[in-house]
């Protein structure tokens, strides 16, 4: 401190310096802390029992909120947008932004069909010869020529590659 004496002509007693440093520390610590943000009110349009993403699990351990569904033909949780074939609506009776998905078993003997607005899926069994396979369930028929076509009766509902 003696070397700095010409700069600091008025010495501060050490107990005052300690008080000053303590006050500065308290002020700085208080300035860095902020009040916790109040929780945002829940969106009234959401049902009260909607779980957090990833917190829901079905009976197979799949997480529907993350896009996973149980595939009967692949015997595992899958994401339809990754492992399925998207079929686009072709009929005016089907909503324009509704998609159907198809997932095949490893040997392609079965096709699992996921229809829009349906909770589960249906398994279609392959019929026909190598030059004209079709997968059938009830009055649904899935065929492939240059693309997949899903018909209900004679009406083509969806198509996709």
Image: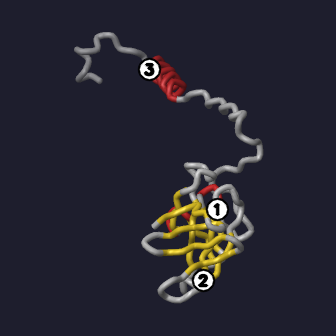
User: Where in the figure is residue 16, as x and y percent of width and height?
Assistant: 47, 17
Q: Nearer the viewer, residue 79 or 105?
A: 105
Where is 130 relative to 41, above or below?
below
Question: Which quadrant of the figure contains the C terminus?
Answer: bottom left
Residue designated by label 2? 126
Instruction: Give the secondary structure at mark 2.
Output: strand
> Disc 2 versus disc 1: distance between alpha carbons?
18 Å
As drawn, the residue found furthest toward the top would be 10
Residue reaching furthest to the front = 154
| Residue occupying the point 63% across, 55% down | 65
Relative to residue 119, is residue 42 depicted above or below?
Answer: above
Asked whether the viewer can see residue 74, the reply is no
Q: Disc count in the image?
A: 3
Residue at 59% across / 51% down in the picture?
92
Residue placed most toward the observer, 26 or 32 = 32
Q: Which mark is residue 17?
A: 3
Q: Secondary structure at mark 1?
A: loop
- In the picture, the quarter occupied by the N terminus is top left
Q: Nearer the viewer, mark 2 or mark 1?
A: 2
The disc at residue 115 is 1
| Dot 2 or dot 1, earlier in sequence | 1
Among numbered discs 1 and 3, the one appearing first in the sequence: 3
User: Of label 3 and label 2, which has the lower sequence position?
Assistant: 3
Q: Mark 2 and mark 1 in contact? Answer it, CB < 8 Å.
A: no
**Quarter of image, res 3:** top left
Give the class, few, some or many, for how many residues have Cα within 10 Å of label 2's Cα (few <14, many ≥20). Answer: some
């Amino acid at each position: 401190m003696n070397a700095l004496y010409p700069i600091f002509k008025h010495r501060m007693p050490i107990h005052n310096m300690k008080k000053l440093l303590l006050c500065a520390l308290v002020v700085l610590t208080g300035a860095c802390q902020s009040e916790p943000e109040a929780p945002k009110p829940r969106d009234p349009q959401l049902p009260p029992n909607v779980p957090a993403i990833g917190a829901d699990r079905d009976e197979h351990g799949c997480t529907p909120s993350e896009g996973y569904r149980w595939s009967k033909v692949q015997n595992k949780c899958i994401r339809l947008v990754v492992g399925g074939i998207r079929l686009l609506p072709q009929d005016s009776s089907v909503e324009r932004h509704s998609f159907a998905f198809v997932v095949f078993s490893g040997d392609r003997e079965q096709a699992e069909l996921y229809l829009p607005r349906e909770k589960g899926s249906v398994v279609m069994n392959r019929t026909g010869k190598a030059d004209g396979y079709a997968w059938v369930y009830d009055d649904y028929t899935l065929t492939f020529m240059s693309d997949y076509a899903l018909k209900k009766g004679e009406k083509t509902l969806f198509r996709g590659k």
